[in-house]
Image (spheres, grey):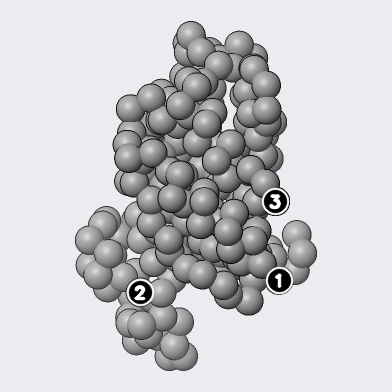
Amino acid sequence: MKRVRITLDPQGSYAPPIYDRLAGGASYLERALIVNWNVATPPTAFLFRLEGEYRRFEGVLAESETVTEYEVLPITDRECYCFVEGEVSRAARSLFESFTRGGLMTVPPIECNADGTNTFTVIGTAADVQAAVEGVPDAVGVTVERVGGKRVAADSVVGRLPARQREAVETALELGYYDVPRDATSEDVARELGCATATAAEHLQKAESTVMGSLLEQ
């Protein structure tokens, strides 16, 4: 049995318009995960977890000609689950099916990255994994990020932080922001990140809230 972390870079008909918004095409979304899906028979259905100004994404769904039904399920004012049912191209459907053939399983969530790629974990026999990777169409870039590892998926609180928040915390640690006494300020963190001080402070506050909430199971 193999466990492999893969990144795909779908283009053209392999990347539906809604996917483009999830993977970097909507600046108001801070993070987008595909947590479940059903592409066995039309219409296809997806369950997303979104962070950011998700109500703006709801407007995109309402105007989409390929979406037949959707529902937004709020968690907080900046986090929600979003169920979407609709039509996708045969090409996009075949790409999903490539990683569920034989005994192969895709482990949720699929992370939609800001550069248009998506990253996920698959487990299965070596032969099934190899066949799936080799069967990815030329129009879709594929990168094997990691083979093996102790966990099937990132389940720690750090793994749940969006990339920019995680980068902010790592930078703050390196600079001594969390040292006692403190050796760096939010201005120093912002300078390293190349963003406004208020933005750096917001990243740190959100990350700290997530970490503390997880520790207290809230």
Which residue is drawn at the image coordinates 59% and 54% (left, top)?
A: 128
Q: Is residue 23 above or below residue 90?
A: below
Q: CA distance from mark 1 to mark 3?
A: 36 Å
Residue 123: where, in percent of width, then height?
63, 59
Q: Residue at x 61, y 11 (%)?
A: 68
Q: Which mark is residue 74?
A: none
Check if mark 1's residue and mark 3's residue have beta carbons within 8 Å: no
Q: Characterize the local packing of mark 2: few (<14), some (14-19) or many (20 or more) Cα atoms within 10 angstroms.
A: some
Badge 3 is on which residue?
103
Amino acid type, label 1:
Leu
**Label 1 crowding class (10 Å Cα cut-off): few <14, some 14-19, many 20+?**
few
Which residue is pictured at 33% across the width and 27% down the height? 12
What is the tally of numbered marks visible in this picture? 3
Residue found at the far right of this picture: 217
Q: Position of residue 7 (x, y in %)?
A: 43, 53
Q: Secondary structure at mark 1?
A: helix
Q: Residue at x 71, y 71 (%)?
A: 215
- The amino acid type of the residue labelled 2 equals Thr
Q: Is residue 103 left or right of residue 14?
A: right
2 and 3 marks in contact (CB < 8 Å):
no
What residue type is disc 3 on?
Gly
What is the CA distance from the residue labelled 2 to the residue labelled 3? Answer: 41 Å
Q: Residues within 10 Å of mark 3 (few under 14, many from 20)?
A: few
Residue 175 quadrant: bottom left
Q: CA distance from mark 1 to mark 2?
A: 22 Å
| Residue 129 position within the rendered picture, expressed as x and y whole percent measured from the top left | 56, 56
Disc 1, disc 2: CB below 8 Å?
Answer: no
Label at residue 215: 1
Which residue bears the numbered disc 2? 171
The reply to whether residue 203 is visible in this rendering is no
